[in-house]
Amino acid sequence: MSLNVSSVPVDCASRTILAIETSCDETAVALLRGFGEVLFSDIASQASIHARYGGVVPEIASRSHLDVLPLLIERAFYESTVSLKEVDLYAATAAPGLPSALIVGTSLTRGLALGAGRPFVPINHIEGHLLSPFFGEERIEPHIALVVSGGHTLLFDIQGFERYKLLGGTRDDAAGEAFDKVAKFLGLSYPGGARIDALAKRGDASSYAFPRSMLHSGDWDFSFSGLKTAVRSFLEKKSSRISLPDLCASFQEAVVDILVTKTLHAACVYRHSLITVSGGVSSNSRLQTKMKDACADAGISLRVAGPELQTDNALMIAFTAAHKRQ
């Protein structure tokens, strides 16, 4: 009688996981042993490809994943010296994301898992971001989590692994989307968030007054469409010379004020002593500074996902899979 290798128990601390992330415009592959031993991790960005269009083109993103992913997987095994038969678990981002891009990653990963006779674990992209501030750890502490990126702005009450309560999210544009759209108004290249952050460091955030939408709405939802429109209207009506650094700083401050105020309020209401911030916008320097200062004043601990875990990446997918298969 043959034994199905997927049923063979493997100690969590020594299990090797191959993870793939293709939810949008970044192709990522990671090999992780246990909860924190990184054997390989790399991200192939398509930013330069999509920059000419001012945003992500789904069909182009999918084709790029098809071209890059096999090469990245081959390099992962070569550089880590791990063999295919040593992989105990396969994982890939299954949702949310661009459907055509997700299909590329999940199909290839399922095929590898099937061929090796190993289990495949589909991972939710948002859950990957949620857990990323705890990378390397077996326990997920209770906390308030802010996931903020180009496609998502979400606030969660977390009681532990797979004990998540969604408190609120954006009703229109995500924070990162607002950054990119405003950057486009200003003639800045894609992705715009980093460009605005860099310019804002030289500007005065009090120069121009922009609205803080839903700051005191009595719920945990966000809205950034009105802020985006306010910037566009300001640019159309302003006749005198505008300082680009001052405008970037003023816009950025409005976004950050909303994110920090609502997140701190949620921590107080739900009596959490820890806040985490993850997602691509968590790399914004002003958000990190203002959230750190606000948490310090309130006596609340803060964890921000590490630089290698802030943008879309496969390490957070592997880490989430490690928790799901304990």
Image: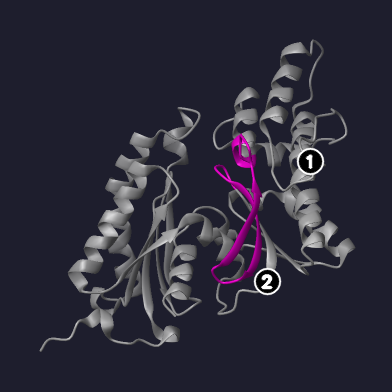
For the residue marked with disc 2, what is the amino acid?
Pro
The number of numbered discs placed on residues in the rendered structure image is 2
Is 64 left, or right, of 299 in this rendering? left
Image location (x, y in percent) of residue 7: 27, 83
Which is nearer the eye, 10 or 70?
10
The residue carrying pointer 2 sits among few (fewer than 14), some (14 to 19) or many (20 or more) residues within 10 Å by Cα, namely some
| Residue to which mark 2 is pinned | 142
Where is the N terminus found, in terms of image quarters?
Answer: bottom left
Compared to residue 148, the image places residue 210 above or below, namely above
Q: Is residue 128 magenta?
A: no
Mark nearer the N terminus (2 vs 1): 2
Q: Are marks 2 and 1 in contact (CB under 8 Å)?
A: no
Q: Residue at x 82, y 42 (%)?
A: 216
When asked about the image quadrant of residue 288, the answer is bottom right
Give the residue at mark 1.
217
**Relative to residue 69, is residue 315 depicted above or below?**
below
Which residue reaches farthest left? Answer: 1
Location of the C terminus (image quadrant): bottom left
- Is residue 87 at least partly visible in the picture? yes
The secondary structure type at the circle numbered 2 is: loop
Q: Which residues are magenta?
A: 149-177
In the rendered view, tell whether residue 107 sits above or below residue 323: above
Residue 19 location, x and y as percent? 38, 64
Residue mark closest to the camera, 2 vs 1: 1
Q: State the residue in front, 52 or 230.
A: 230
Q: CA distance from mark 2 to mark 1?
A: 25 Å
At label 1, the amino acid type is Ser
**Image location of residue 87, percent across then percent down:** 30, 76
Q: In this image, 14 relative to 120: left or right?
A: right
